[in-house]
Amino acid sequence: MQESLKFEKSFAVEGGSFQNAGNVSGQIKSVLKDLGVPKDIVRRVAIICYESEINIVSYAKKGTITLAVTDDAVKIETKDEGPGIPDIDLAMKEGYSTATAAVREMGFGAGMGLANMKKYSDHLIITSEVGVGTCVTMMVMNVQKLLHPDLPPVNLR
Amino acid sequence: MELETLVRELNLKVSCAAGSLKREVKGGYVGDLLSDVMANSKEGDIWITRQVHQNIVAVASLKDVAGIILIQGSEPAHDTAAKANAEGIPILVTDLPAFEIVGKIYQLIKP
């Protein structure tokens, strides 16, 4: 992957800052458009980025979202200093949420975030340590799916 | 249909970004859950919601929706309006509830 790297940048996300939520996703979307990444890929990355950003804003003190673009894929990697996820399988279940009432009132915290991140990426890995933070790595594959739309998602494991 | 025509036909109040109404409305999406709208709305949709906080502008911008209609006479929050004007995201207001405005929009733009 390294040799075909076209773009890499980390963006800081501030915890609790709902007024800025979506700014990083907007910047990432602009970068991808400028790089000429296909529209469907941009759409999927925008969704997983926004959900990642909202998770950091909702739960963590701060975090980063790193975008890496190669000819084959777009990689989004998030790292936060948050409470961590004690049971990742449970957290992945659609509808499960630990969001506060205030967060839910804004239309977040419906337990769709991680589920959307999984649905709109081809590959997702979560590692988390309670009391330390959470890392999520997501890949959205490019060329393979464009050339062979019927292929199943590429498994990088 | 152009957003401007929709505004005129449905007597919508233009609350923000009055200069950005020349957009094509291709369809619509209704929702107050931002993750749902983020995942399922499409480019060119008109988005009907009763959420008025500023995160609706980020979602609308990321999904390239044609505009946002707030229902039941809800006005955008002050910071929402400022952000929508800055980003050129039209916010329109109807006094009708979601069910009624959606029915009217569907009649106007259905294929």
Image (cartoon, coloured by chain):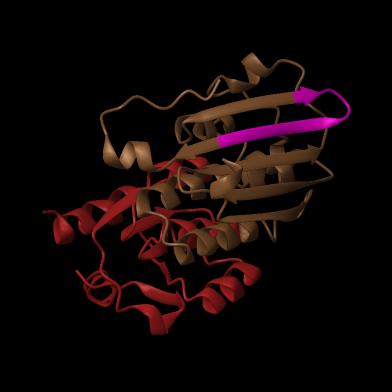
In the picture provided, is A130 more to the left or to the right than A23? right
Residue B76: x percent and y percent?
A: 55, 66
- The region drawn magenta spans A128-138
- Identified at 64% across, 21% down, the residue is A91
Q: What color is chain A drawn in? A: brown
Toward which corner of the image does residue B18 lie, by quadrant?
bottom left
Does residue A134 lie above or below B53 as drawn?
A: above
Q: What color is chain B drawn in? A: red
In the picture provided, is A67 more to the left or to the right than A59? left
Q: Would residue A24 be visible to someone looking at this image? A: yes
Q: Would residue B32 be visible to someone looking at this image? A: no
Q: Quadrant of the C terminus of chain A?
A: top right
In the picture provided, is B19 more to the left or to the right than A6? left
Outermost residue on the bottom side: it is: B19
Q: Main secondary structure of the magenta part?
A: strand
Residue A59: x percent and y percent?
A: 76, 38
Residue A69: in magenta span? no
Toward which corner of the image does residue B95 lie, by quadrant?
bottom left
Q: Nearer the viewer, residue A49 or B16?
A: A49
Residue B102: x percent and y percent?
A: 28, 52
Q: Nearer the viewer, residue B56 or A130?
A: A130
Does residue A10 lie above or below A145 as drawn?
A: below
Residue A33: x percent and y percent?
A: 45, 63
Outermost residue on the front side: it is: A3
Outermost residue on the left side: it is: B111
Residue A136: in magenta span? yes
Q: Quadrant of the N terminus of chain A?
A: top right
